[in-house]
Amino acid sequence: MKKKVLISVAIVILVLVGALIYLNNRNRTLSPPGSAQLSNGTLTVTVQYSRPSVRNRVIFGTKEEGALQPYGEYWRLGANEATEITFNRSVSFNGSEVAKGTYRMYAIPGADAFELALNSELGVWGVFEPDQEKDVLKTTVPVEKLSTPVEQYTIRMDAVGDTTNVYFEWEKVRLTVPVVGK
């Protein structure tokens, strides 16, 4: 009798583990991992994030519009794990000083501008809002409206002189953040 109970418990555990593996893999298929890295002079900027797709949804807007990311609410700048950015040296990030290191990034979307934050809390699942007392920077970035929509969320970079521009693009929105090594 005891042996049957142990076998039943083992089967239940295996089924649960299998289900969790399947669900985790499914999320990664829908929002695969992405990365962007650029070295510009002695500055290297690296971003790790996940790349959700629009899939015929309203991404940014009001709750009444059924937006996936309503204005005024926390967004992890991607999907799955929290989006993280690393600077190999101290930088000016959109005009504000930031020490070298790795930071969790998140945003509060708005119709005309997003509030972007860098936070020292690392290694957490992105859906959970960060402890805002660990924010090292908050900055406002204007929204650029794109004429051609971007289906899959993309973070990319380019160098213009000593400035590394970090672009966040999704649906019809682009944010541009200038980063300059100090």
Image: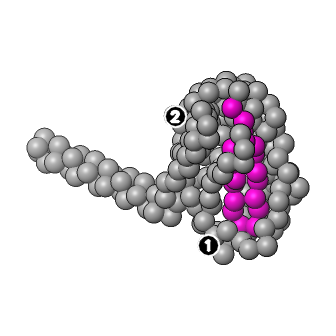
Q: Position of residue 172 (x, y in %)?
A: 76, 67
Q: Where is residue 114 in the image (x, y as percent from the top left)?
A: 81, 49
For the question of whether residue 4 can be seen, the reply is yes
13, 100: nearer the viewer: 100
The residue identified by callout 2 is 123
- Please, what is the three-letter code of the amino acid marked with disc 2? Gly
Q: How far apart are marks 1 and 2 (CA)?
A: 28 Å
Task: Tell me if residue 83 comes above or below residue 67 in the rendering.
Answer: above
Residue range corresponding to the magenta coloring? 163-181
Q: Residue sitting at 71 percent across and 39 percent down?
A: 162
Are there few (<14), some (14-19), or many (20+) residues within 10 Å of tag 2?
few
Q: Residue sitting at 26 percent across and 51 percent down?
A: 14
18, 90: nearer the viewer: 90
Colour mode of the rendering: one colour
Q: Give whichever of discs 1 and 2 has the lower sequence position.
A: 1
Q: Residue sitting at 88 percent across and 55 percent down?
A: 112
127, 151: nearer the viewer: 151
- Please, what is the three-letter code of the amino acid marked with disc 1? Arg
Q: In which quarter of the image is the C terminus?
A: top right
Q: Quadrant of the N terminus?
A: top left
Q: Which mark is residue 74?
A: none
Q: How many marks can you see?
A: 2
Q: Residue sitting at 52 percent across and 54 percent down?
A: 34
Q: Which residue lies furthest to the right in this view?
A: 112
Q: Does the magenta stretch include residue 61?
A: no
Task: Tell me if residue 34 comes above or below residue 171 in the rendering.
Answer: above
Task: Tell me if residue 41 comes above or below residue 173 in the rendering.
Answer: above
For the question of whether residue 27 can be seen, the reply is no
**Secondary structure of residue under mark 2:** loop
- The overriding secondary structure of the stretch rendered in magenta is strand
The residue identified by callout 1 is 55
